[in-house]
Image (tube, rainbow, N blue to C red):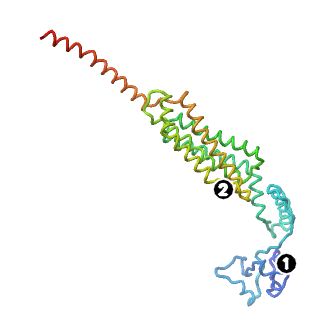
């Protein structure tokens, strides 16, 4: 206390006293103290300063120090945030009473997770909104507006359904689940986008034919991709780590819902109100032209033959 009070008053501290000053835990005090040379005009640390030089000049002050507190922190990470708030209020009161000469902070690794868990809803929603906007901009660059909007809407529905899955299995909304939701946005978009792209490229005049072509050409690939992801993450189900089990639940939920969206929901919507597209219109016009040419040939052949018969 004497050493810290002397440092707060900017007084000179003898190195011998600092070296032999005990601290809780039996460690030498020098490991918990940062010494600074007492120089005219301030206490800035000169370049290349070695604290051992204080043993020669004996004119150093305590630049910073620490001490250990033993506390029974709650198991809930968010409750640790409230403990940090209470301890921070005590430190702020000390800073106020010493007119700013004694400043400090309190730290524990649980306080970091507690702070995140306390603000995870606000941070998670803002991050999800940013990801949705970025995904929408990327899909709008390569797909028609309707198909892009359908894919983004499907992904948003999948994230809402994953929140329902969290409630059913009893998962908390924390840093792990928030990161898993963000990953789910990137994984779930593939199924609807691939099906929509195959639908848009199909050269058929009707929605039903375009959906059938998309499912026949891309459906098996989508299903195999989802199945391989499920098999690749199956081993996480037997993990003892809560992090891996949470990731397993989100991964399987994302894949199952993504497969349903890409192979059931998107085809039904596209087959009902999907855009026809320029490929289908061109194919339809080409088919009409072929039909007209065929009919003209059939009509002209007998006429030409009749004329030949008359000429003979």
- Residue at 69 percent of width and 44 percent of height: 162
Sequence-wise, the earlier of marks 1 and 2 is 1
Q: Position of residue 224 (x, y in %)?
A: 55, 46
- Residue at 84 percent of width and 83 percent of height: 21
Q: Examine the rendered structure and indicate whether residue 10 appears above or below residue 76.
A: below
Q: Secondary structure at mark 2?
A: helix
**Quadrant in the picture for the C terminus:** top left
**Quadrant in the picture for the N terminus:** bottom right
Q: Examine the rendered structure and indicate whether residue 306 appears above or below residue 246.
A: above
The answer to which of 57 and 300 lies nearer the viewer is: 300
Q: Which mark is residue 25?
A: 1
- Residue at 44 percent of width and 27 percent of height: 205
Q: Residues within 10 Å of mark 2 (few under 14, many from 20)?
A: few
Q: Secondary structure at mark 1?
A: loop
Q: Position of residue 142 (x, y in %)?
A: 48, 41
The answer to which of 240 and 192 lies nearer the viewer is: 240
The residue tagged 2 is 235
**155 sits to left or right of 110:** left
Q: Quadrant of residue 16?
A: bottom right
- Residue at the far bottom: name it: 56
């Amino acid at each position: 206390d004497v050493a810290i009070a002397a440092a707060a008053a900017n007084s000179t501290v003898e190195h011998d006293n600092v070296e032999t000053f005990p601290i809780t835990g039996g460690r030498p005090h020098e490991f918990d103290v940062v010494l600074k040379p007492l120089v005219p005009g301030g206490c800035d640390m000169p370049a290349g300063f070695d604290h051992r030089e204080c043993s020669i000049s004996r004119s150093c002050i305590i630049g910073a120090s620490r001490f250990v507190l033993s506390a029974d922190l709650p198991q809930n990470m968010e409750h640790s945030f409230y403990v940090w708030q209470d301890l921070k209020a005590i430190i702020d009161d000390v800073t106020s009473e010493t007119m700013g000469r004694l400043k400090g902070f309190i730290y524990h690794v649980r306080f970091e997770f507690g702070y995140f868990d306390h603000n995870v809803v606000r941070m998670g929603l803002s991050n999800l909104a940013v990801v949705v906007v970025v995904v929408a901009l990327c899909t709008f660059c390569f797909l028609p507006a309707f198909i892009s909007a359908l894919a983004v809407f499907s992904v948003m529905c999948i994230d809402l359904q994953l929140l329902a899955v969290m409630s059913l299995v009893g998962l908390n909304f924390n840093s792990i689940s928030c990161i898993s939701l963000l990953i789910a946005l990137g994984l779930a978009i593939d199924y609807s986008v691939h099906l929509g792209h195959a639908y848009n490229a199909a050269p058929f005049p009707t929605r039903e034919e375009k959906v059938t072509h998309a499912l026949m050409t891309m459906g098996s690939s989508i299903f195999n991709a989802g199945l391989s992801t499920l098999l690749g993450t199956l081993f996480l189900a037997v993990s003892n780590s809560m992090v891996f089990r949470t990731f397993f639940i989100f991964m399987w939920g994302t894949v199952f819902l993504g497969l349903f969206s890409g192979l059931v929901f998107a085809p039904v919507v596209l087959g009902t109100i999907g855009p026809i597209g320029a490929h289908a219109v061109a194919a339809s016009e080409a088919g009409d032209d072929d039909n007209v040419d065929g009919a003209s040939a059939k009509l002209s052949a007998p006429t030409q033959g009749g004329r030949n018969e008359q000429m003979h």
